[in-house]
Amino acid sequence: MKPLILTLGLLAALPAEAGSFTPPEGCETFLTVQARGCRVSNHYRCEADAPGDQWRADFDQEGVFFLSHVNREAEWVESFEFNPDVRQSLDDGAADPAEFSKLLSSGRDDFAFSLSRTDGQNTEVTGFDALTGRSITIDGVALQETEFEYTETDAEGTILRQSRGNEYISAEWRLFFAGPSEYRDGEAWLPMDGSPVKFILPGEPGFAATQPIYECGALMSSYRKSSEAKEALSHDDL
């Protein structure tokens, strides 16, 4: 748990102004993604983690707001929300773990798992990811489109959050990326689109950036709130 605390503290201290992302000691950034919805994400891997584990730090104009950790199967392991600080973790013994390999081989992966949060809330998540058969190239990177749906309920079965729509996957990076979707945490469905716009590799201009550049404006505060909730559940990329 100590490495996680150090990671959380390091990222929380990062400045909001433009700068270069520095991952925790023993970790290396391998990809920066500038996306729609005023978000830039830095993806990194750490030597101390299990093989295939990956981390993602999300930034908006105010600084880092979300941190997520996935394993080789792109199974969501844990996440950190900032302001207020909350850690959300995957419970052991998932009824149907998310499996990236199964999605690639069969075209569909159903999942069912439980989550625990440091604020005391425990929830159940069920849903699926399925390949649509459509391929798309964004900024020179070949991706496969998916459709997805998930529902999160509390211990009594009350629906807390739902999301549906499309995402994109990279078989090479074993990552999900957001796409056009809808999110609901109340009565109304809110349209969202956090699709990637630019993929930046080490040595390229803009690598490790901490300031988003696309679709930034006054309306992004509502997107940020919904994005946090969705990304906290999908894969990581929940």
Image (cartoon, helix red, strand yellow):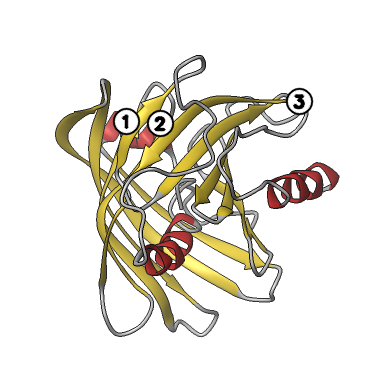
Q: Residues within 10 Å of mark 3 (few under 14, many from 20)?
A: few
Q: Residue 231: x, y in percent?
A: 45, 55
Residue situated in front as seen by the camera: 132 or 12? 12
Residue lying furthest right? 2
Instruction: Tell me which residue sits at (51%, 43%) in the image.
Output: 75
Judge from the rendering whether residue 76 lies leftward or rightward of residue 185; answer left or right. right
Task: Write down the residue under mark 3.
Answer: 26
Residue lying furthest front? 17
Picture quadrant of residue 56: top right
Q: What amino acid is found at the position of numbered circle 3 in the picture?
A: Gly
Q: How far apart are marks 3 and 1 (CA)?
A: 30 Å
Q: Residue 107: x, y in percent?
A: 25, 37
Task: Write down the residue under mark 2.
Answer: 101
Q: How crowded is mark 1: few (under 14 residues within 10 Å), some or many (20 or more)?
A: some
Callout 3: helix, strand or loop?
A: loop
Instruction: Tell me which residue sits at (43%, 53%) in the image.
Output: 234
Q: What amino acid is found at the position of numbered circle 2 in the picture?
A: Ser
Q: Residues within 10 Å of mark 2 (few under 14, many from 20)?
A: some
Residue 104, numbered label: 1
Residue situated in front as seen by the camera: 109 or 25? 25
From the image, state whether disc 2 or disc 3 is nearer to you. 3
Callout 2: helix, strand or loop?
A: helix
Q: CB under 8 Å between callouts 2 and 3?
A: no
Q: How far apart are marks 1 and 2 (CA)?
A: 5 Å
Residue 237, numbered label: none
Q: CB under 8 Å between callouts 1 and 2?
A: yes
